[in-house]
Amino acid sequence: MSVNSIGFIGTGAISEAMVRGLLAAPAYASEIYVSPRSADVAAKLTRDFASVRIANDNQGVVDASDIVFLAVRPQIAEGVIRQLSFKEGQLVISVIAATDRETLLEWTSGSVQLVQAIPLPFVAERQGVTALYPPDKGVAALFDTLGTAVQCESRKEYDLLAAASAMMSTYFGVMQFTTTWLEKSGLENAKALAYVAPLFASLAQTANKPGVVSFGSLSREFATKGGLNEQVLANFEKNGGRDALTAALDGVLARIEGRGH
Ligand SMILES: NC(=O)c1ccc[n+]([C@@H]2O[C@H](COP(=O)([O-])OP(=O)(O)OC[C@H]3O[C@@H](n4cnc5c(N)ncnc54)[C@H](OP(=O)(O)O)[C@@H]3O)[C@@H](O)[C@H]2O)c1
């Protein structure tokens, strides 16, 4: 266990995942305070963990906690954060998307130690990779407990990883396109799911092994010269697959950097 108390302003999906990861044995915090909104999630957490308490209000979370997570939606963040009065130098970790450091510091009056992070739902099983900015050893240790932390030296690095995190839906989309094609071609749905999920799981595990320095070399390793894998990749590229992905990442980065939608 590394810290006494951690608080969450906003008890939604990502806060629930972080609380579950932080309190998995051995617990990382002795007490966790959550805000009373989203009463069902808050109540579920207090049922599952003796060390979770529901604060009376958002200020109650800040007052009771050494570290405060900001985890509300961007649209309401300003109204929520401006009402809070933080302790001098308090560690505040914002996971709020599309809200930059300068803006958050202005809303928090600038007296806090602010770190931004992009946790992913897998933190609930302590398997997530979390980008954080600016680099901070303590916050990196917290997210290393929830999987692995990647510390970004610049806002550019952080924004680039935020763009990469937007690949999650497309990953499952590729699985769905494959499954739909199998079904349309005559395979029953259950068999398609039973085949595609372990296939992608094995590939992801292979990519995540220590010592892998390039996914390109894995791609070549899995493509026999003149074979089926080589054919699919060549077709994907020829028909604009790579270009579509590159354009999608460029577009999402522009949105993250506030240059467009
Ligand atoms: N989900 C992810 O995988 C993920 C990953 C990284 C970052 N994020 C970011 O994390 C933030 C939260 O995302 P989420 O997916 O957890 O959203 P969510 O499930 O909608 O959770 C937001 C929570 O904020 C609560 N809330 C609303 N008004 C509030 C107030 N005035 N004071 C305190 N809490 C209030 C909501 O309560 P009610 O339900 O009662 O309205 C809800 O529990 C977003 O900025 C998102 O971009 C999410």
Image: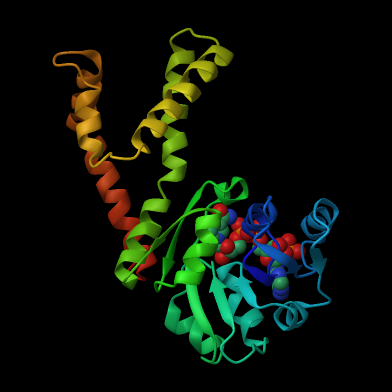
Residue 241 against residue 143 in the figure, above or below: above
Q: Residue 57, how many percent across, how many down?
A: 79, 78
Q: Is residue 158 shown left or right of residue 31?
A: left
Q: Residue 248, how many percent across, how many down?
A: 32, 49
Q: Residue at x 32, y 60 (%)?
A: 160
Q: Is residue 46 shown left or right of residue 242?
A: right
Residue 245 against residue 187 in the figure, above or below: below
Say whether residue 98 is visible: yes
Q: Quadrant of residue 82?
A: bottom right
Q: Residue 37, how many percent across, how many down?
A: 77, 67
Say whether residue 119 is visible: no
Q: Quadrant of residue 95?
A: bottom right
Q: Residue at x 26, y 37 (%)?
A: 215
Q: Is residue 257 shown left or right of residue 6?
A: left
Q: Is residue 25 shown left or right of residue 180?
A: right
Ligand 1 is found in the corner quadrant, namely: bottom right
Residue 185 against residue 139 in the figure, above or below: above
Q: If the image is split into quadrants, where does the C terminus sit? A: bottom left
Comparing 44 with 29, the one in front is 29
Q: Residue at x 79, y 62 (%)?
A: 51
Residue 122 against residue 252 in the figure, above or below: above
Figure colour scheme? rainbow
Q: Residue 246, how many percent across, how many down?
A: 25, 47
